[in-house]
Image (spheres, coloured by chain):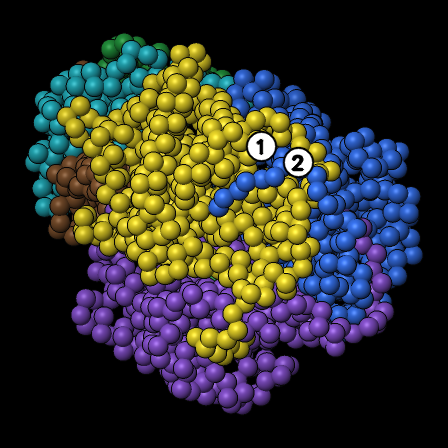
Chain colours: A yellow, B blue, C purple, D cyan, E green, F brown
Amino acid sequence: MKKILTFLIPTLLLSGVASAEVSAETAFVFNTFLFVFSGVLVMFMALGFSMLEAGFVRKKNTSAILLKNIALYSVAGIMFYLIGYSLMYVDVSGWIGSLSGAFYDTADDLTVATEEGGYSLASDWFFQMVFCATAISIVSGACAERIKVWPFIIFAAFMTGIIYPIYGSWTWGGGWLTEMGFSDFAGSTIVHSVGGWAALTGCLILGPRAGKYGSDGKITPIAGANMPLACLGTFILWFGWFGFNGGSQLALGSAADASAMSIVVVNTNIAACGGVVAAIILSQLMYKKIDLSIALNGAIAGLVAITAGPDLSNHFLSMIVGAIGGILCTIAIPMLDKMKIDDVVGAISAHLVAGIWGTLAVGIFGSGDFLVQLIGIVAAGVLVVPLSGVFFYILKGTIGLRVSEETEASGLDKAELTTEAYPEFK
Amino acid sequence: MKKILTFLIPTLLLSGVASAEVSAETAFVFNTFLFVFSGVLVMFMALGFSMLEAGFVRKKNTSAILLKNIALYSVAGIMFYLIGYSLMYVDVSGWIGSLSGAFYDTADDLTVATEEGGYSLASDWFFQMVFCATAISIVSGACAERIKVWPFIIFAAFMTGIIYPIYGSWTWGGGWLTEMGFSDFAGSTIVHSVGGWAALTGCLILGPRAGKYGSDGKITPIAGANMPLACLGTFILWFGWFGFNGGSQLALGSAADASAMSIVVVNTNIAACGGVVAAIILSQLMYKKIDLSIALNGAIAGLVAITAGPDLSNHFLSMIVGAIGGILCTIAIPMLDKMKIDDVVGAISAHLVAGIWGTLAVGIFGSGDFLVQLIGIVAAGVLVVPLSGVFFYILKGTIGLRVSEETEASGLDKAELTTEAYPEFK
Amino acid sequence: MKKILTFLIPTLLLSGVASAEVSAETAFVFNTFLFVFSGVLVMFMALGFSMLEAGFVRKKNTSAILLKNIALYSVAGIMFYLIGYSLMYVDVSGWIGSLSGAFYDTADDLTVATEEGGYSLASDWFFQMVFCATAISIVSGACAERIKVWPFIIFAAFMTGIIYPIYGSWTWGGGWLTEMGFSDFAGSTIVHSVGGWAALTGCLILGPRAGKYGSDGKITPIAGANMPLACLGTFILWFGWFGFNGGSQLALGSAADASAMSIVVVNTNIAACGGVVAAIILSQLMYKKIDLSIALNGAIAGLVAITAGPDLSNHFLSMIVGAIGGILCTIAIPMLDKMKIDDVVGAISAHLVAGIWGTLAVGIFGSGDFLVQLIGIVAAGVLVVPLSGVFFYILKGTIGLRVSEETEASGLDKAELTTEAYPEFK
Amino acid sequence: MYYSKYREVFMKLITAIIKPDKVEALRQALTGVDIQGLTIVEAKGYGRQKGHTELYRGAEYEVHFLPKSRAEILVDSADVEKVITTVSEAVKSGKIGDGKIFVTEVQDVVRIRTGERGAEAIK
Amino acid sequence: MYYSKYREVFMKLITAIIKPDKVEALRQALTGVDIQGLTIVEAKGYGRQKGHTELYRGAEYEVHFLPKSRAEILVDSADVEKVITTVSEAVKSGKIGDGKIFVTEVQDVVRIRTGERGAEAIK
Amino acid sequence: MYYSKYREVFMKLITAIIKPDKVEALRQALTGVDIQGLTIVEAKGYGRQKGHTELYRGAEYEVHFLPKSRAEILVDSADVEKVITTVSEAVKSGKIGDGKIFVTEVQDVVRIRTGERGAEAIK
Ligand SMILES: Nc1ncnc2c1ncn2[C@@H]1O[C@H](COP(=O)(O)OP(=O)(O)O)[C@@H](O)[C@H]1O
Ligand SMILES: Nc1ncnc2c1ncn2[C@@H]1O[C@H](COP(=O)(O)OP(=O)(O)O)[C@@H](O)[C@H]1O
Ligand SMILES: Nc1ncnc2c1ncn2[C@@H]1O[C@H](COP(=O)(O)OP(=O)(O)O)[C@@H](O)[C@H]1O
């Protein structure tokens, strides 16, 4: 590897010759491959969430959280295929799509014109699906250790088949928010806040874990059982985020696209760095010791924050956006505890709070309009909280939502699954 | 990310202009990169197997299974280089290749014509090698907790140098099965059943772990020590499978190839989703509780099942193929136990049973002929069982195959390795 | 997947037509994507180091090592952005670059000419940054279980902002070593030895962990707490190394480049295989049992050894280079112990010793000049040891470098962090 | 032959096998009656409460042992009944498996730090 | 020398240090002689069976302690010999490290659930 | 019914609750005075040494129990004082939390391997 850069010496700008230079079919291959590559990275984030959450729960609830995670990803894959994708993207009226695109025939896969930014529909479908799965992953962590397995799985089907696609149709589907100019590059709001709102709703309806909040206002923290797993999950999420944000450039068929994607990747990385460093420093200042679990949340918060606008032209600004995300998350964690909202993994702080911040930041530093950004943020809450709330209440009133006190004490693994996570470890 | 699809509106079909549009050398780069990218993903499956197996064994045998896994991948890399690749692909007579391609000179790497689907030989070699390693990975899990380390390593050399390449030469090498029209896109039979047959043979010759089956027919399950590791392994395998199946398109040098690969990726994913959901529902029905370990096996079974024909044009059908794979696997697990075949990780159920199903499914839903598919399946068993059986018996009669009773009781880690896996965890 | 090779039949050589066949902009996209893809793989190595190190330390120091790892990667990302990249690559005088490239404007991202091997600057920046992070990752493992968290983080900032970039400017930046003809393809010396020298310096200044070396010369080994994590980390490193070495081809815009990258990938893999097999056999011979931890180190040593020259045209030779790396590492581990140098994870043996070997090997088997290679190796030591030594001493004299005896006994997690790694596991 | 100066035996060891989730209640209850020391060990117990049948991968098996905590409290003989009552009340649920308390004689106690002996050592 | 003719004490605590893989055999043997309760704790032991030398990364070290299980059985005094015999037979391999059984006097037992005292509490 | 006046007991059980990092020192010290056996169990203790306050994710909580090791040594009655002294010296740091030693009477010991009884069984 030898690298001698002719750095910063402006030469011929590409933009003019770009479209002439990459053939349409070559661009089709690039674009398609970008979706597949990025989609595979984002799919891996399902593992990231699984490990993060398995690290943050207690041993006795570990198999249950793992099961919920692999189930939610599988359910998302099926529901988004059966109805979600179509509701989100096909014949979007402004407020919702239709079911006319369900069960699409892959014979049409090549039908999108290749003259201009063509790509395989299947690759795009895959890329969109993994985003949908991410939204529900956020909920599983927040509601862990007390929500029953089957009701959660049913909620996952509703979330990935209905809730997420509706908001998605308003935005990426081309609906009213897009027409208004709402700007959310890779989904700080569309994925992370939407997931975060549902997580918040679930936490409120479920109530906190037994023993967490004393009647005297005293908080008894419940430490996660396995920090290496939490760290593993965080790094996997970071890794997958390069696909999440990088792939959201949606095209790789020209030098301009390739360059834009690279900038997105760099901004994504440096925002996460900023989030980590900010969370470490702040936890040291606030608590006189570093809190690893907060540092990990800081990374996620930095990533979530930059997700709405990772195409910033200034890397330094991206670092700041990420750092502020990390700070807000670090502050939100004890605040939620004070409000007796028991979020097992910090999902609300890292995804909802940082997601709102990141979406606003696009209105401050980026190309977005602040007011429109605010409208988009509020719209997400206004849609998701009631929809998911009603659905949670229906579950509560029918098959029940929360495990019994005994099950909670002895652990979900024993009660709802056959498999303890660590049968040999005392 | 803004996505407004002009969905399902047929426009100009590409196929006609494809070859004109991507230059031969660009196609060479695409094809080569596809092999490297996919090969790297499949290489990662070696970690998937390691973690899955480390999760399913008891603590006292964990270092041993990790060592076996890193050793088998390393031995596969060397043996497939020294003889396997050549036996499988060079001058294949119909029944076996030759050794004339061993030690090939990388100076020839560019010699395959680029006019039509060219690619780097080295990239292809890499891609083929990681498939070979997968086959032996299947054996290590099934035979865990009782097979001695060194005999297993020697068997791995035989499997990757001889057994797998011979069957490979009959099929992907262009031998008699290919000429007959046997269709196995990415290796439900060629990789997974071949591995599964060897695993079954090993399990039969080794016998079950001490204490698993009582003389009265009572089964004493031996729970895996670490479900997060098993889940980690499963997700890594799923992740790697996008390379396994996607890369088996073998070309990315045209829009048609890119599109075909995308369809393969989507089918692969949805089949796994189907396998998971089917296994969860079935385990709930059969046992009144969800069995996480079976859900994980269900994912693998779904993936194995779709591997023979992930190019199905109907995603829904792929989901069904995967779901049936998951169901068969879930049923096979207790059946094998009833037959006192002690498969530690469920490899026979997930790889052999689902592999047979997937290969037949190509004869039902796909382009294959049912009878030919059946012949290919039987041929694998007829080749692998005697070959591996004889080799296992030779090992048994010479250096011994199974650890002593005391070693089994105290664990392989202490007896055969210097390193316990969790020295501090009581 | 059907593969019938017309193997070894020389046809038209590409090199002549290459540049004509891939358009400049297409090449730009390929090159840029190679950097992004490889950079993402190398970024993942940060997780590999985290897990490897978390597996090798004792439970009580696990959160601390995880924190150090995520912090070092974040600090590297920021420092290399603020000054490192510029010092290494911009206006390099021969001995050091300048700060004139800091805060570069992404508006210039497309300015590198696309006529000849163009690529996005941002993608290159990302690729270079992850290499820088790798160098400091090596230090954290060696100095684990006794270095204070904050001083380590400050050292990480110095290492990634100053030390690594200076040596980098001498070599990849085009400085005096490059002009002399020093050859280090992907950084056996530039990354691994530089990290290894700093690790050695740190170990010497810190001294060994309490209880490791008796006054009577007796060594009390301190076993790592979690071998599955160590194995996980090793495989992730191996996986990431395909980006580390493959990406160091620095271009994918022609068939020749794609072919060269493939050869690099194959050599990288087979060297690691050689390292593992050599370490397993040697540990069996030396100790009558296999040492898993040494097998894992063997993989790393094989990878480090091939890193200086993975473009060897002979795969067999690569296997030998890797195997010798594995052997040297296996021998170095007990030798360092005899010298009372307490390297928790074997970083000095795997990165410094094997890195030196690999760099020399280029002078023996590859294109390098043996003497020049030696000069480069010595230069790394002469630069890094005093610079890092002085900095460590400054830290020691000011805020302190090593934790107190009580902290060491009770573990860093309790003293410096709020979070124990496994609070529930007794 | 060991004869403690304190041979008239002023101390007892009270061992309680209880459910693990009652440890914190036990500690608080003891603090309430001014007993400021105990030692806990994780245990598994088998008794009338018979374990249960589990299914793993389709095979039934019996779990014979249940997780228990074993608490040891060194007390002055005079406090024995008080402690028995306190412990019983703190951990009792009335369900099978609540556990046992048993009392043994202690011939001497040493506080290592000070070398104090006998009842002094647990004050 | 165990002949406690003193009969005012009706209960004994039998503690057995055994090899961990003998726990299940012990439980079954006790059930066979109608002793329906025991409490197990994981332990590590040092005795004549001297541990062993291990190698880790090329350095030798001695493992002094071996894993053991510590079983406690509260019995009626009349059952002591029967239990000693039963335990011995169930766990004996004849090899060094088989372990020890020791007997101590118990002055009272309480069944927490019911408040029963004395021998009633372990019936 | 709490009084055993029966005094012809030749063995004692010495139990020491100590800091976990003193186990190796304890073993070496005992070997030094020719006591060749002990059994260790991991424990957690609560005493004067009051645990401490921790912060996790911004919330304070009290850690009441501290990790301890519980060592059991069966000895001939004649060795009791020697062992108490040896153990005390080996593990004492003078700081709070050093732990306790307590002595109980043992009525019989069996070496399972040989069937030896009484003091023979721990020779
Ligand atoms: N004879 C015994 N010896 C030792 N421990 C016992 C004995 N009987 C019961 N235990 C312990 O007490 C626990 C509770 O006893 P069990 O008979 O299940 O319920 P209960 O005390 O409510 O009747 C058991 O799990 C075991 O640990
Ligand atoms: N004096 C002792 N005090 C306490 N425990 C002992 C004593 N001697 C032996 N043990 C326990 O009994 C176990 C077996 O004893 P050991 O001397 O190794 O074999 P054996 O009982 O067959 O002679 C030891 O590992 C230890 O746990
Ligand atoms: N009354 C008691 N009963 C049982 N164990 C006790 C008692 N008092 C103390 N301990 C044990 O001894 C340990 C040390 O006691 P502590 O009072 O903290 O210090 P010290 O022995 O130095 O006064 C405790 O952690 C606990 O395990």
- The answer to whether residue C315 is above or below residue B126 is below
Distance between mark 1 and mark 2 Cα atoms:
9 Å
* Residue that mark 2 sits on: B8
Residue closest to the eye, A348 or C344: A348
Query: Seen in the image, is C85 located left or right of residue C355?
Result: left
Residue closest to the eye, C317 or A236: A236
x 83%, y 69%: residue = C8
Q: Position of residue C404 (x, y in %)?
A: 21, 60
Which of the image's four quarters has the N terminus of chain E? top left
x 53%, y 77%: residue = A2
* Residue that mark 1 sits on: A90
- The answer to whether residue B237 is above or below residue D56 is below
Quadrant of residue B332 in the image?
Answer: top right
Say which element carries label 2.
Answer: loop
For residue C155, the mark is none
x 62%, y 44%: residue = A123
